[in-house]
Image (cartoon, grey):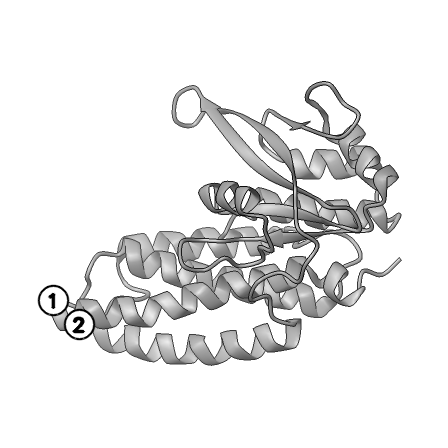
Amino acid sequence: MLVEPRSGLLAAWGNALLAGLVSPDEAALAIVGEDAVHRVDGLPGEAGPVGLTLALGRLRGLGATGFRVALPVPGHPLGLSGPPDFNARALEAEEAVVAYGVPYGLVPEVTEAGPAGDLHVEVVWRVLPVREAPPADVPSLGEAERELAEALRDATAVLSRLDVAGSGPVAEAAMDAYRARAERGRDVLAPGYPPRAVRVLEMAQRVGLLVSVAYENGHGGAVSASEIAARGEALRPVERLARRAQVAAYNAYVEGGEVRR
């Protein structure tokens, strides 16, 4: 979770664009990030793929008033509302964007080529019909903040007892990388999001780091089967709540109308 999902970038900067806080070119540049190119395929009225700038303008012209994020995984259709075809594609990608105000969603298909360290990444966003219904399991910002803080306390206590968090060179390197990114003053979300949404997303990213370090740091002191199982039981709900918090932060504009003009 140290890197924002592409769906989060598209939704956040798309919302900033709809709010008049950034230009189409600024939004497109932020969404593409370090990727080589993004295209959008399947837009009504277009015969083939088009660039992000044109696509965002077309969606706005069709009536889109906001964008929200879905981050589903097997067993947890977080942010989805159907129909089955869209849900299946979003679940395969583990992310999607749903437009608010028009019945369309976008699912990224990512293609990578080249050697490690010099990857050429292209993204095609597939536009598909969506059902206009409340998304699954999306909390409010306040709810997400409270439950994530509580889960983090519980998980930290369990992981510390099992000696699997915050130790070893892998953990130290991950923490150093996170601190370096924070010190560079990286932007979180897009212009106009309220401070609470930024705070919730930052907390979700920190929790994601903890989960990643705990998984990547081997079994640590958890040498018995029961201790390994306890670690998994501690991490799974925290990971789930971190994703819920991410979605709540990205969706603050649509769910609460909180982007400031």
List the residue tagged with mark 2.
227
List the residue tagged with mark 1.
223
Q: Residue flagged by tag 1: what amino acid is it?
A: Val
- Give the vertical position of 218 relative to 90 (above or below): below
Is 149 left or right of 32, judged from the image as shown? left
- Give the vertical position of 58 relative to 256 (above or below): above
CB-based contact (under 8 Å), mark 2 and mark 1: yes
Query: 74 or 243: which is nearer to us?
Result: 74
Report x, y in % for residue 129: 66, 41
Report x, y in % for residue 82: 59, 51
Query: 10 or 182: which is nearer to us?
Result: 10
For the C terminus, the quadrant is: bottom right
Residue 143: quarter of image: bottom right
Mark 1 crowd level (few <14, some 14–19, many ≥20, 10 Å Cα): few
Report x, y in % for residue 203: 54, 67
Query: 221 or 88: which is nearer to us?
Result: 88
* x 42%, y 69%: residue: 238
